[in-house]
Image (cartoon, helix red, strand yellow):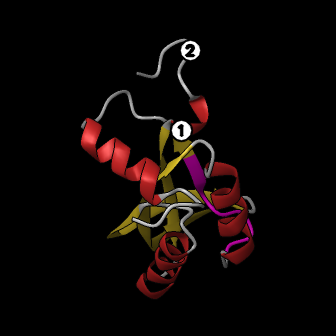
Amino acid sequence: MWGRGGNMSARVWLVYLTAPTAREADRLGELLVRERLAACVNRLGPIRSCYTWEGRLQKSREYALLAKTTARRWPALRRRVAAEHPYDCPCIVAWPPAAGHPAFLNWVRSAASASSRS
């Protein structure tokens, strides 16, 4: 399905994001679904994050988001999250899944389409 000759722009992608609060995570998730940049967004957490920022070890409580979108919608999703996110350097990473339930993948393609209404 995704091999040579496949439509790469229709490929489903998973996007991992973090947010500082449940309220902010919900706001971002709802924005992405409302604007059809993602078919679905799951909020996970709270999670505990450990990282270095400005040379110091940081530990914080965050919320993770897992969004389902397409390769075609990914650039707009990334730009929208970066513009709306309260962090200076938000975590926004994406990758294509190795496999998935065909009916679900087709639904993601339809629901994350700028032109269709599911």
- Most extreme residue toward the front is 116
Residue 105 picture location, percent across and down = 35, 42
Q: At label 1, which amino acid type do we have?
A: Ala
Where 63 falls versus 73 (above or below)?
A: below
Residue 108 picture location, percent across and down = 40, 51
Magenta residues span: 87-93
Q: How many marks?
A: 2
Where 103 falls versus 41 (above or below)?
A: above
Q: Is residue 13 visible?
A: yes
Residue 5, label in figure: 2
Instruction: Identify the image quadrant of residue 31.
Output: bottom right
Where 104 falls versus 45 (above or below)?
A: above
Q: At label 2, which amino acid type do we have?
A: Gly
Drawn side of residue 54 relative to residue 93, left or right? right
Secondary structure of the residue carrying numbered label 2: loop
Q: Is residue 56 visible?
A: no
Residue 106 picture location, percent across and down = 36, 44
Front-most of 115 and 41?
115
The residue singled out by tag 1 in the image is 10
Q: Is the stretch drawn in magenta largely helix, strand or loop?
A: loop
